Amino acid sequence: MKIIWSPLALDRLSEIAEYIAQDNQTAAEKWTDTIFAKVEQLKSFPERGRIVAETNHPKIRELIYSNYRIICRIEEKRFSILTVRHGKQILPADDILT
């Protein structure tokens, strides 16, 4: 299985890491590394994570890490990472319809 990161997901990841780095650069790097590691686990466990409540679609799933949601879509032979959001943020439909 291949993992494809959307430009939006990479932008969100970068924004969050920059925010964390304002207080602690090492923590930001560790957070980013952990996000990538969690996403890589999808290759071994493709249906890992729960169905995103906002969609109720079995192919749109989320992985939770700390206070963040990693939203992905299961597709044939690949995963598309759609966005990364803080759990308290509203998930805009545009983020998952890419």
Image (spheres, rainbow, N blue to C red):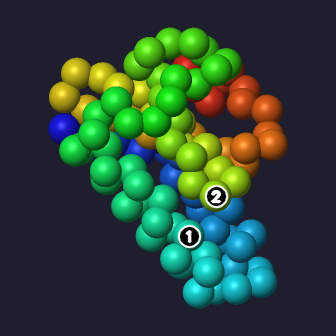
State the residue position of label 2.
Answer: 66
Picture residue at 39% right of the left edge, 50% below the top: 39
* Relative vertical location of residue 45 with respect to residue 21 in this rendering, above or below: above
Picture residue at 74% right of the left edge, 70% below the top: 19
* Relative vertical location of residue 76 with respect to residue 37 in this rendering, above or below: above
- Horizontal side of residue 76 vs 21, given as left or right: left
- Horizontal side of residue 54 vs 56, given as left or right: right
* Labelled disc at residue 31: 1
x then y, percent, for residue 93: 68, 21
Picture residue at 62% right of the left edge, 80% below the top: 27
Q: Can residue 76 be seen in this view?
A: yes
Q: Which type of secondary structure does the marked residue at label 1 adopt?
A: helix
Quarter residue 55 falls in: top right
Picture residue at 24% right of the left edge, 44% below the top: 43
Tag 2–tag 1 contact (CB < 8 Å):
yes
Instruction: Identify which amino acid the numbered label 1 is placed on.
Output: Trp
Tell me the mark number nearer the camera, choosing from 2 and 1. Answer: 2
C-alpha separation, residue under disc 2 versus residue under disc 1:
9 Å
Q: Which type of secondary structure does the marked residue at label 2 adopt?
A: loop
